[in-house]
Image: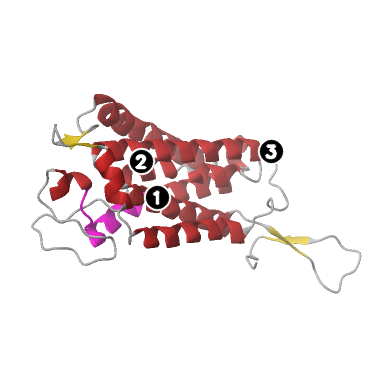
Amino acid sequence: MPLPATSRPLNLWLALGIPAMTALTLILLELTSLDMDLARLMYDPVAGQFIGRHSYFLEDILHDRAKQAVIVVALGAIVAFVASFFWQRLKNWRRELGCLVMAMALSTSFVTPLKAVTAVQCPWSLQEFGGKETYSELLSPRPATDKPGRCWPGGHAATGFTLFALFFALRDRRPRLARAALLVAFGLGTLFSVGRMLQGAHFFSHNVWTAVFCWLISLGCYYGVLYRKPVTVSGRSGLAPRYDMADKSL
């Protein structure tokens, strides 16, 4: 299928406004006990552990196998991108495949460095849930400890939300398939997030922050690599609009 002359309309106020408002809401939620309240709902004080802490389904299937499945998708995208240089049928999709590979790589690689920098403790490590560590809000100083946390943002949530990249890779050529990919990405990310919350690995806000980051990364890759907007050449009446790949003005 040939590359469209211009991209489908992109409302940046909406695409950026929703994650911005979500981020602001998450910051305000730091003033509440929502994260702890939700975590307590998933904790069994009698057993002294989170209700999904040792669940075979949550750990082996929803965590390990599901992560492997997404890795297969990422590897498939890399193979297809490389093949696009040699296989004519994939040549017209090279930019989309490159954008997909870049967005998925960035959406997963940002997690580990941020975990190390923020040192946020996991719920299962906290004194309130049978651990030894002291709880602190995201923007608060970390209490002294010999074992800094590695739980913000959510790594497994990023495994699901990284598929936002599929939505952007498909949105100009296959809009219906793109919407389906968006629903799958949001659904998997949410499912993975809830699973890890049931295990005590993350608070609610950790996963929502992850969704925000993954969305913005995929949006940025799309806007920088694939987005094409119409540019009317002034002073040349009667000529059709020219489409400038380099123009990224709003």
Q: Which residue is mark 1?
A: 208
Figure quadrant of residue 179: top right
Q: How far apart are labels 1 and 3 at the CA level?
A: 36 Å
Q: Which residue is mark 2?
A: 193
**Callout 3 touching callout 2 (CB < 8 Å):** no
Q: Which residue is mark 3?
A: 1
- Which tag, 1 or 2, sits closer to the chain's start? 2
Q: How far apart are labels 3 and 2 at the CA level?
A: 36 Å
Point out residue 181 in the picture as x, y percentages from the top left corner.
Answer: 54, 37
Figure quadrant of residue 223: bottom right
For this view, does 206 lie left or right of residue 81? left
Task: Specify the amino acid type for callout 3.
Answer: Met
In the rendered image, residue 121 lying in the magenta stretch gets the answer yes
Q: Residues within 10 Å of mark 3 (few under 14, many from 20)?
A: few
Point out residue 127 in the picture as x, y percentages from the top left corner.
Answer: 13, 49
**Callout 1 touching callout 2 (CB < 8 Å):** yes
- Residue under the point 60% across and 61% down: 13
